Every structure is written in structure tokens, then in C-alpha cells.
């Protein structure tokens, strides 16, 4: 299962696959963290604790993580030497919230992760509907079609086809 995770405002892709039998209290998992073109992989035993999770890496290293949900829908993850704010699948969660698609004012569509603009599907002045494709960005060898968060008119296209973009880069403005 793959998740889109914002860690301190920076998008990452995390893939978690079970290694054998798992239960609600934990199990053994292969975890792959993708950061742009860089990938880190680990196999861990994961156990649920009263405060969060305990990860036991091959080789015996143990990392305890306290996980606390916040009012903003994020999670505060407290590790041994650092606190991290994380949000899982923010775009999917926001898409399901009432009123987001009809949000007032202009909406800025940004690159969710570093990549390359493959196609621009609209031009300034085009009328668009909710979830209509605006731009296609290739990231991690996959093409991702980014769609309009609301019905409106394309005000600005801030990139060109073939351009490399970093995470958070403005792509399209819909008003």
C-alpha cells in the first residue's frame, strides 16, 4: 500500500508491504520511503504501543514513535531527537471534505513532488469543472494528472511542457 505523506510540508511517498502475517498489534513490514529520485528501504518489526509505534530494525535498532493527531488533521510524530508534523494523503482527504470543491477565491494547484511537466491540458481563460485534468507531471516514473480543485476559469499557467518542477511549485491558478 502506498501513501502520499507531507512531512514538515515536504511531500513523500511511503510504500508499506507486509512480510507474512500481521495483526492489529503489529507485524513485519518492508517500508520504502521515496524522496524525489532517492529511495530508502528498511524491513522492520512494528509493534503498537500506548503512545504510538515501536519499530525494530534488522540489526536490533529500536525507534519508538509517539503519534498524536492534531486539530488540523495532521499527526505530530515525536521521535527520539526530532518532532515531525505529518499529513497522510492530504489531497484525498481534502477532496472529500464538504465545500472544498466549491471554495471561494482562486485555487493554486502545486506540484505534489519533484518531477517534469509532461502535458498541459488547459490554457488561460479555459472554463474547467471540478476534478478536470489541468496538467500531467511525471514523478518517480509515473504520470500524475493533477486536477482542478473547483469549477472555475484558468487564470494562469505558471509552467511549460518539459519543465522540471520541485515539490510545491505553482503549476496552475484557477479562479
Image (cartoon, rainbow, N blue to C red):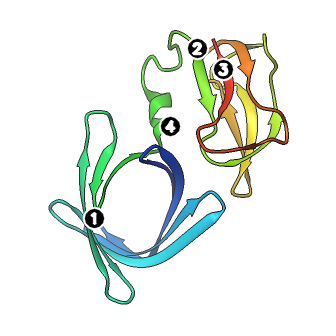
User: What secondary structure is found at the residue carrying circle 3?
Assistant: strand
**How many C-alpha atoms fall within 10 Å of the one at disc 2: few (<14), some, or many (≥20)?**
some
| Label 3–label 4 contact, CB within 8 A | no
Q: Answer yes or no: do the residues labelled 3 and 2 have beta carbons within 8 Å? A: yes
Compare marks 1 and 2 and give the one earlier in the sequence. 1
Question: Marks 4 and 1: which is nearer the front?
Answer: 1
Measuring from the top left, give residue 174's x and y in whole percent. 65, 17
Quadrant of residue 71 in the image?
Answer: top left
Around disc 1, counting alpha carbons within 10 Å, would you say few (fewer than 14), some (14 to 19), or many (20 or more)?
few
List the residue tagged with mark 3.
Answer: 173
The numbered mark, 2 or 4, whose residue comes first in the sequence reads 4
Point out the frontmost of discs 1 and 2: 1
Q: Residue at x 54, y 55 (%)?
A: 13
Q: Is residue 34 above or below residue 129?
A: below
Residue 62 coordinates in the image, percent (x, y): 28, 79
Mark 4, residue position = 92
Q: Earlier in the sequence, mark 4 or mark 1?
A: 1
Closer to us: 124 or 152: 124
Amino acid at each position: 500500500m502506498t501513501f502520499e505523506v507531507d512531512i514538515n510540508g515536504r511531500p513523500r511517498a511511503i510504500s508499506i508491504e507486509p512480510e507474512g502475517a500481521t495483526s492489529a498489534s503489529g507485524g513485519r513490514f518492508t517500508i520504502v520511503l521515496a524522496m524525489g529520485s532517492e529511495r530508502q528501504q528498511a524491513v522492520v518489526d512494528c509493534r503498537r504501543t500506548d503512545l504510538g509505534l515501536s519499530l525494530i530494525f534488522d540489526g536490533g535498532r529500536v525507534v519508538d514513535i509517539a503519534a498524536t493527531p492534531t486539530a488540523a488533521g495532521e499527526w505530530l510524530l515525536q521521535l527520539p531527537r526530532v518532532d515531525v508534523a505529518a499529513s497522510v494523503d492530504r489531497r484525498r482527504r481534502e477532496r472529500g471534505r464538504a465545500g472544498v470543491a466549491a471554495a471561494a477565491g482562486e485555487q493554486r494547484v502545486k506540484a505534489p513532488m519533484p518531477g517534469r511537466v509532461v502535458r498541459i491540458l488547459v490554457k488561460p481563460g479555459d472554463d474547467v469543472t471540478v476534478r478536470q485534468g489541468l496538467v500531467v507531471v511525471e514523478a518517480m516514473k509515473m504520470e500524475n494528472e493533477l486536477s482542478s480543485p473547483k469549477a472555475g476559469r484558468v487564470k494562469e499557467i505558471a509552467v511549460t511542457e518539459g519543465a522540471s518542477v520541485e515539490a510545491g511549485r505553482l503549476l496552475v491558478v484557477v479562479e
